[in-house]
Amino acid sequence: MKKFLLPLIGFAVLVVFLAIGLNRNPRDVPSPLVGKPAPDFKVPQLGDPSKSFSPADMKGKVWLFNVWASWCVSCRQEHPVLVAFAKQGGVPIIGLNYKDAAADGKKWLVDFGDPYQLSAFDSDGRVGINYGVYGVPETYIIDKQGVIRMKHTGPITPDSLKDEILPLVAELSK
Amino acid sequence: MKRWLVIVFALLLSLGAIAKDAAPLAEDPVLEARLMAISEELRCLVCQNESLAGSRADLALDLRREIRTMIRDGKTDKEILDFMVGRYGDFVRYRPPVKPTTWLLWVGPFLLLGGGVAAMLMFLRRRTKQPLAGPLSDEERHRAEALLANSSSKDNRS
């Protein structure tokens, strides 16, 4: 019996490590920007290029910053969740139309609905780089002081909205 | 007929004159070499097993453009690396820095190797300590003979 104890312990440790490893999402790279002020930028708005948008405009509000593009397939999966969220009211969503053609972006919002208060237009992806965007869609929760409190990579699902985003938004809005 | 062939052949030969020189890969080979050296060290976030130098992902193109601009602006390698890590985290580096959260990563393989060597030494020492088999006792010899007789009789049958 004692002979098997050591290999058994070794096996159990291995199983625990593999179980943890297999249940993690390798696409989910922790962002070093969480807890830091949202990088500043100033770009034109998608709807009206004569107006610009800067994160400073949102000071004093909790808001969601959602990176999307008309060429992004997962964004279509995410979009109805955002539209429903926007209908409920709550916090404003600002879009970042990332590396898109303005006409395509606008058409997309007409076709699928526009949950955004406005969409900033990042044609060359520079804003995206400053936010560490590597896979659209991505969503940032930014607090009243303009600090990034959470980054969600990939489409927001009803579950992740309910379990991760809404509780944090409620806490930050207090 | 023959004349036609000659004309066609001459036209084919002249195609080379129309072809343009291949565009140079880089305007500034020194800059490009530095860009490659830096981006070999960086991971492409989109195709995570590719380096930034080797990836053709859209984001990799953008990031190489960004690094190229920074090199032109006279930024040091460290500043460029800090720029990337500040946005994408340590994950972007192929050589993670040595710090408390990565100690296990750096030391782990050596710990495993050390453990393996220790276990092997213990096993070998225990084995050499075991007494060598002495001469057979009477009972053992009888059993061995019985077994041998048994197996040879089986052989005969088959």
Image (cartoon, rainbow, N blue to C red):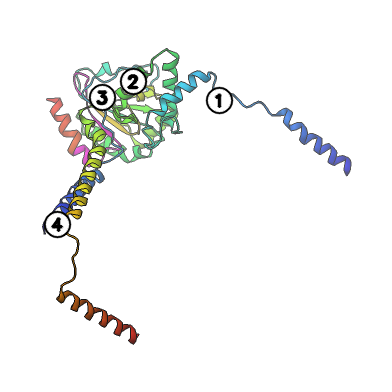
* A74 to B158, vertically: above or below: above
Mark closest to the chain's N terminus, 2 or 1: 1
SS at circle 4: helix
SS at circle 1: loop
Residue B98: x %, y % from top left: 26, 27
Residue type, label 4: Lys
Circle 2 crowding by C-alpha within 10 Å: few under 14, some 14–19, many from 20:
some
Q: Is residue A27 magenta?
A: no
Circle 4 crowding by C-alpha within 10 Å: few under 14, some 14–19, many from 20:
few
Q: Is residue A143 magenta?
A: yes
Nearer to us of marks 4 and 2 is 4
Of A34 and B125, the residue lying toward us: B125
Q: Residue A21's quadrant in the figure? A: top left
Circle 3 crowding by C-alpha within 10 Å: few under 14, some 14–19, many from 20:
many
Whether labels 4 and 2 belong to a single chain: the reply is no
Residue on which the image places disc 4: A3
Residue type, label 1: Leu
Q: Are marks 2 and 1 in contact (CB under 8 Å)?
A: no
Q: How many marks?
A: 4
Identity of the residue furthest to the top in this view: B74
Residue on which the image places disc 2: B83
| Cα distance between the residues tagged 2 and 3 | 12 Å
Numbered circle sitting on residue B25 = 1
| Cα distance between the residues tagged 4 and 2 | 53 Å
Q: Are marks 1 and 3 in contact (CB under 8 Å)?
A: no
Q: Write down the region rendered in magenta.
A: A142-162
Q: Chain of mark 1?
A: B
Residue on which the image places disc 3: A33
Identify the residue at image location x=19%, y=61%.
B132
Of A7 and B44, the residue lying toward us: A7
